[in-house]
Amino acid sequence: MKYILIKSLYCLLISITVFAAGISAETADLQYRYAEQLFESGGYQAARLAYKRLLFYDTNTEFRDIADYRIAQSYYYQSATTHAEALFREFSTKHPNSPLRFQSHLMLGQLHFDAGAYSLARTTLFGLLHTTNAPEVVEAAHYLRGWCYIHTTDWNKAISELRQAGTSQTGGHRGKKARELADILLEETPLPTKSPQVADWLSTVVPGSGQFYAGKIREGLLAAALNGTFIYLAVDAIRERRYVDCVGISLIGWRFYWGNRTDARRFATEYNTHHEQALIETLNRQTEVSVP
């Protein structure tokens, strides 16, 4: 951190000195390289100031699109997502002919992905795929769309997207990881599942059986015992003509009976969610989602 601060101050002193004497192509190149060095070393705030300084003193610099893109990236890496999204959105308007406009579009998809808006991320990336044939961008878009489908547990579509990312001829790290992820999904899916509707129906007919079906043996035994006890007490009250007691027992027992059905559905849903999350965690351990 101290090293970055020293570099930032040094960059500032150099910039003030050279710009006070007037900007030149050589000076702009020097300023740009200082800004890039700061950015690459992780000094995003200092780098952002250096890029802004470059744009302020030389509005027509050849590095204008790169500087604007880096400024947006610096906000992204510092988790200032609102600023980053606004800058990435306006990038194509400011630089309609820059090749980085596709990267900016890709970063919008990444922002939506990070926010958990997987449907919006897929739509954004789908639009990108119809506007460019740049191999690296296409690969990254398919890869990120694959992860969107992974998080929404649409395994077949995830495999399809990852396969398309893996067929890229860029030979990049992302393409290799996409192939590995697709292979894991192909091997592990379809996942074992339990139907919440079946669990509900089973516990409606025989209390506790839905819990057994969902793999919750102890809970199933408890539900069967409680509901069996209330049924026995209600029948015994009827047999002895204690109808008021029967009504009271039935009202209390009904709550346990209904809870037995609700629990059966919940346990089946939890069973499915557990297996889905376990697979996603396996994929996350295999590789991290790459930032474009």
Image (tube, rainbow, N blue to C red):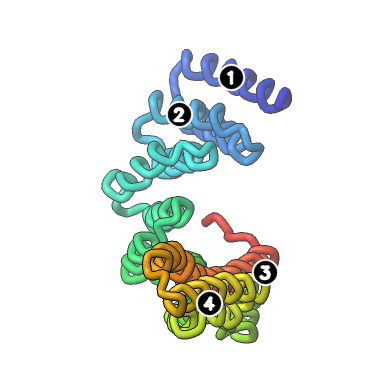
Give the residue type at disc 2. Leu
Q: Residues within 10 Å of mark 2 (few under 14, many from 20)?
A: many
Establish if 58 lies above or below 208: above
Residue under pointer 3: 282
* Residue 100 visible (yes or no): no
Q: How far apart are labels 3 and 4 at the CA level?
A: 48 Å
Which mark is nearer the camera, 3 or 4?
4
Tell me if label 3 and label 2 are in contact, CB under 8 Å.
no
Tell me if label 3 and label 4 are in contact, CB under 8 Å.
no
Residue under pointer 1: 14
Where residue 232 is drawn, which disc sits there? Answer: 4
Q: Is residue 38 left or right of residue 105?
A: right
- Secondary structure, mark 2, is helix
Image coordinates for residue 218, horizontal then vertical, percent? 67, 72
Image coordinates for residue 255, horizontal then vertical, percent? 43, 64
The numbered mark, 3 or 2, whose residue comes first in the sequence reads 2
Tell me if label 1 and label 2 are in contact, CB under 8 Å.
no
Tell me if label 3 and label 1 are in contact, CB under 8 Å.
no
Image coordinates for residue 35, horizontal then vertical, percent? 56, 33
| Figure disc tally | 4
- The residue lying at 43 percent from left, 41 percent from top is 81
Q: Residue 267 or 254: which is nearer the viewer? A: 254
Q: How far apart are labels 1 and 2 at the CA level?
A: 12 Å
Give the residue type at disc 1. Ile
- Secondary structure, mark 3, is helix
Q: How far apart are labels 1 and 4 at the CA level?
A: 89 Å
The numbered mark, 1 or 2, whose residue comes first in the sequence reads 1
Residue under pointer 2: 54
- The residue lying at 66 percent from left, 65 percent from top is 287
